[in-house]
Structures are given as structure tokens and as C-alpha cells.
Image: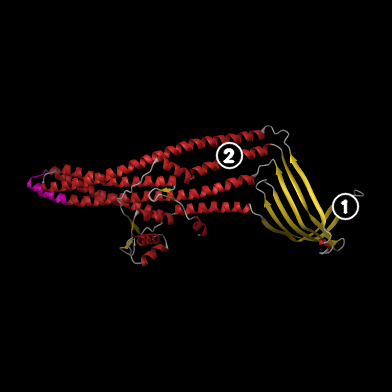
Amino acid sequence: MLMKTGLLRRAAVLTIGIGTSLSVAAQQPPSSAVRLSSPETIHVRLTLDDAIYAAQNQSIAAMVAKYTFLSAYWSFRSFQASRLPSLNLTGEVLSFDRSLRLLQDYDTGEMRYLDNYNLQNTLGLSIKQDIALTGGTLRLYSSLNRLDQFAPKDSKSYYSQPVTLSYTQPLFAYNKLRWNKKIAPKEYELAKRTYIESMEAVTTQAVSYYFKLLLSKTRHSIAVKNYANTTALHAIAEQRLRLGSITQDELLQLQLRMLNDSLSINDTALAVREQRMRFNSYLRYSENVDIDPVLDDRIPAIEVDYATVLDKALENSSFNASNQLRTLNAEAGIAKAKAERGATATINARFGLSQTGEEFRTAYSNLLDQEVIGLQFSIPLFDWGMGKGRVRMAKARADMVRNQIEQDETDYRHTIYTLIEQFHNQRNQCVVAARAREVAESRYAIAMENFRRGTVSVTDMNTAQTEKDQASQTYVSALADFWSYYYSLRRKTLYDFISHTDIGAEFDRLIEE
């Protein structure tokens, strides 16, 4: 039954948003989460879990995180596809050429213009495979060319290459394929962890907006109650003034307090509207939605220690993955600079069969072997130290990255330690703040009763009220800080310390959407 109620509440929460969601919610009967007071306004009672659920499913920040991950996913898919063989059909059809070409007679050396009047059609099918281990390219292709010559006489001919195997192998070159094989999976893993962290950031922001609205409503509620109480006490004080049990100055103090409470009602009401608009905007709710955050006094027993938190942070978060990727990119930069500094060479080899003929069938008869192999090279004899400078610059960048990673690790450990200490301290603060609120409320109730009896002055009464108000606000602020620290720990570790499980995401569902 509890599970069903929670699902209904979350469903109700998600139906209240911008556009069509308002009309859907208005047509449905009110549930425990949603009650309709008028056609214009929808009142929504949200628990902290409901607010987090709504933010993760419909906020703009959640959408940005989703599409950022999808961009990284398709980039990784493109990398995987690039490692597979590619099949290509190429052709050039109806290539008509009627022009004059300047040619030289090899016998006489005479230069003269000749008519070029022909039509060519070419069709080819090829399979290409990049070799990550060596950085070479293997290609298998077949092609057929037909040439129709119209001048100086009509003729046609075919040129076929039924099967040809070619291989291109760079020597001493930067092997981009091999480095991408190392880097691309790390980038995708980093994207996954970054997405989960982004969703935890959405959670943290939702918690912040939730408690800001709760605190502003708490202040407004306090102001309304104080005004009502002060008004009642002011009536009593007027009677006591006629009896001479209080002075005119004390009555004026109470009257001033009542006026200040009235001003506080207006100020806090404005603050509530501002915080509500900000929260509505973040959750993508309509302006007509009035969110009523539910105060949950429960403080779960969460035990965290530095070693566990640090291990989970290094294991789950993007921190280690990001550092590994930075190191790989730095090493790839050094390898590229070294490869571009010295000599470069490329081996080209091609083996296959070919034939020509005036008829289609003759072009595929009595096939002739063809073998082509060659070496191209480039050797820099003197480059004024540019190559050496690029290598040193790449090494300097790598050293800087390693030093920066070391410093980042130190800062990261310090941040985690500080966050744990703040979390432990804030849990104790919540306990103290809860007790202080109880004491302040009891003291205020006693002060009001004693004031009615005439045993407490107006000054003491005002002091008790101020302490009560401050204690209530302090308690809500303490709860806000507690949950803020908790969800900050979750974001750092991607670990739920309440359920004792790692925080993941349904990436398959994200991809299929």
C-alpha cells in the first residue's frame, strides 16, 4: 500500500507542469498529493523525495544532462563504428567530355591540339578496414570502367579490376587509431559518471530550492501566528492598563510589536511568492501551482567515515576517470610530437587482377596480374629546432598535468574530509536545534500564560517570542544544511548511504528514448 501511495504521489507530481500537464491534473480527482481549491490554482504538497523526483524527471538541468550524455554516447558509437570494416559503392556515370587537349607527339616533339570527344562510366565496390595495431589501412575493391570514344572514330572499351588488394602503412607516424582505442572508452566512461553526478547536482539544487521555500513559508506562518497572538495579548493589555497593572509604555511596546508582526506578514508573503516562482521555474511547473513543502523531522541514522567515503569517491565518481583521461591525452600529445619531429615514411602496396577489352566479357578474360609497391619518405634535414621544441613543449604539458593531478588529489581528499566533518557536525546541530525549538516554544507558551496572569512584563514577552521565532527558523535552516551536506556527499561518492547502494542510471532507457 505504501509503495502504491508513493507511486501515485509521484505520478501526480509529474502531471503538474507547464503546458498540457495542468489540464491533465485539473481533470483528475484530487489525491493525497494534489488538492484543487479553485480552477486557477493547484496546491501541491511535496515531500523532499517528491521534489527530487520531479526535478530529475522534468527540470531543464536534467534534460541538459541527458542530452550531454547522449552526445557522448553517439560519439563513442561513432568510434566503435570506425573500427569496423566499411563497405562503399562509388561511381561516376555519364561523364561526357568534348574538348580540345594539348598533346605532344612523342616521335616529332610537335605540340598540337586534338579533339577529346568521349563518354565514361565507372562503378566500383570497396571494403576498407583500418588496423589499429599498426595504424595502416587495408582496402579490397573491384571496379569496372567503360569508355565510349566518339572521335576521331567511334569505339568503346572496358577496363576491369575484378579484385584488388591494397595496403597503406605509415612508418614512424603517430598512430591515432591506437591512441583513440585507449582514449575513447575512457571518455565514454567519464560521460556516464558525469551524467550521474549531474543528476545528483540536480538533486542538490532541488533540495536547496525546497528548503528555501520551506523556510520562507515557515517565516510567514510564524508572522501570521505572532500577529494573531500579539493582537490577543494587546486586547488583554488594554484591560490591564485600565486596571493599572501595566504602564502605557508597555502597552505601546506591545502595540509596536503587533505593527512589526503585521509588516513581517507582508514581507514574508512576498518572500514566499519569490521562492515559489523560482522553485516552480526549476521544476517547470506553471505559475498557478502553489507548492506546499512538507517538513519531515526525521534524521536518518547515517554513519560515514573518511576511508569509506574516499574509497567510494575514487571508485565511482568522475574524478579518477577524468585524471586518467588527462594523463592519456598528455601521453598522446608526446607521442604525436615525437612522430612529427623526425622522418616519416609510407609503404604503399597493391596487388590484383586487371584486363581491358572492347567487349564486356573480354574485359574479364585472361586477367593480368598487377603488383605495385613503393616507399614514400620525408626526412627533415634542418628545421631550426621546431620538432625538438614541440616535443619539449608536449613533455612540459604532461609534467604540468601530472603535477596538477597530484595537487587536485590533495585538494580532493581535503574537500571530502571537510565535507564529512561538516556533515557530522550538522547532524548534531539538528539535534540541538530541535531541542532548542521545543524549549523556546514551551517558554513562549509559559510567557503568554504568565502575561495573561500579569506576572510577566511586555519586554520579557517580546524576548520569548523573538527566541521562539529564531529557534524555529534555526531548526529549519539546520535541516536544510543537513540534507545539503548529505546530498553533496552522494554527489562526491555516487553512493547512497541510507540504502547502502551505488547510485547508477538506466543508460539503456536513456538511449532508447
Indicate the amino acid at tag 1. Answer: Arg
- Which quadrant of the figure has residue 21? bottom left
Give the crowd class for mark 2: few <14, some 14-19, many >=20 residues within 10 Å. Answer: many
Image location of residue 289, percent across then percent down: 35, 59
The amino acid type of the residue labelled 2 equals Ala
| Residue found 31% across the figure and 50% down from its top | 298
| Residue receiving disc 1 | 112
The residue most toward the left is: 243
- Residue displayed at 35% across by 51% down: 210
Q: Determine which quarter of the picture holds residue 150.
A: bottom right
Foreground pick, 130 / 462: 130
Neighbour tally class for label 1: few under 14, some 14-19, many 20 plus, Cα within 10 Å: few
Queried whether the magenta region covers residue 497, the answer comes back as no
> Which range is magenta?
232-246
From the image, tell me which residue sits under label 2. 330
| Side of 167 relative to 308 (left or right) | right
Residue 415 versus residue 120 in the image, above or below: above
Name the side, left or right, on which 199 lies relative to 292.
right
